[in-house]
Image: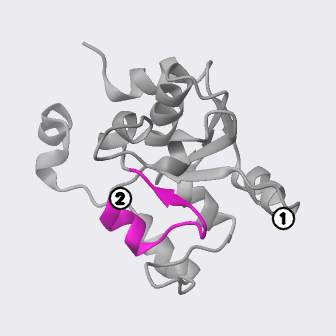
């Protein structure tokens, strides 16, 4: 059995990661990669990079193909385009970029540090209505909040 962190580690050598400033530089230079946000819709609505599209990881594979209810034409047609996958911390995006590569996408990359890092670099995020989200508000949103029952029982009993 593999743990989540082990799956992430297996992807690292095969998926190119870009730091937030690398992506910002591309955007400022007029490059237009497809920004693919693979978080859940409620996360995307709260805040996202302007111009990104939302395709949750749970439907990614069928969204990449024609003839499915989940098909996203812009994504299907992006196989030869640079696709930068985005999530909260850079883990889900790494797994999704690996999946895209396996499905024939020539330039699928992951945003290293995710939107947390994007916000730390003070790059703009917008909400569902297109309003810019305050940096401190985003910082609070991205702060992990684990409930006791979500912690490893071995660590709970040692505390």
Residue extending farthest top = 1
Q: Give the total of numbered labels.
A: 2
- Of the residues under marks 1 and 2, which one precedes in the sequence? 1
Residue that label 2 marks: 144
Cα–Cα span, label 1 and label 2: 31 Å
Q: Is residue 59 left or right of residue 131?
A: left
The answer to whether residue 112 shows anywhere in this view is no
The picture places residue 156, in percent across and down from the top left corner, at 15, 42
Q: Is residue 66 above or below residue 136?
A: above
Q: Position of residue 78 (x, y in %)?
A: 61, 41
The tag on residue 49 is none
Residue 139: horizontal and vertical position, in percent? Answer: 49, 71
Q: Quadrant of the N terminus?
A: top left
84 falls in the magenta region: no
Q: Is residue 137 left or right of residue 70?
A: right
Residue 4 in view, yes or no: yes
Within 10 Å of disc 1 (Cα), the crowding (few <14, some 14-19, many 20+) is: few
- Mark 2, Cα crowd under 10 Å, few <14 / some 14-19 / many 20+, is few
Q: Secondary structure at mark 2?
A: loop
Which residue does the image show at 46% across and 31% down from the upper left?
A: 95
Magenta stretch, residue numbers: 41-55
Decide whether residue 54 is among the magenta residues.
yes
Quarter in which the C terminus is drawn: top left
Closest to the observer, 81 or 37 = 81
Taking the spot 60% from the left edge, 57% from the top edge, the residue there is 117
Dot 1 corresponds to which residue?
A: 28
Query: Colour scheme in the image?
Result: one colour
| Res 17 quadrant in image | top right
Residue 22 on image: x %, y %: 78, 50
């Amino acid at each position: 059995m593999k743990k989540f962190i082990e799956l992430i580690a297996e992807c690292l050598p095969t998926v190119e990661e870009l730091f937030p400033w690398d992506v910002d530089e591309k955007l400022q230079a007029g490059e237009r990669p497809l920004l693919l946000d693979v978080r859940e819709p409620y996360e995307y609505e709260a805040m996202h990079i302007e111009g990104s599209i939302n395709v949750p990881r749970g439907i990614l594979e069928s969204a990449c193909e024609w003839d499915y209810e989940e098909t996203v034409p812009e994504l299907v047609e992006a196989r030869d385009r640079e696709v930068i996958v985005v999530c909260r911390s850079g883990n889900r995006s790494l797994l999704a970029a690996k999946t895209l590569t396996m499905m024939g996408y020539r330039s699928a990359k992951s945003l290293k540090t995710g939107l947390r890092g994007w916000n730390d670099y003070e790059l703009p995020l917008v909400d569902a209505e297109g309003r810019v989200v305050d940096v401190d508000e985003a910082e609070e949103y991205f702060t992990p909040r684990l409930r006791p029952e979500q912690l490893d029982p071995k660590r709970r009993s040692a505390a």
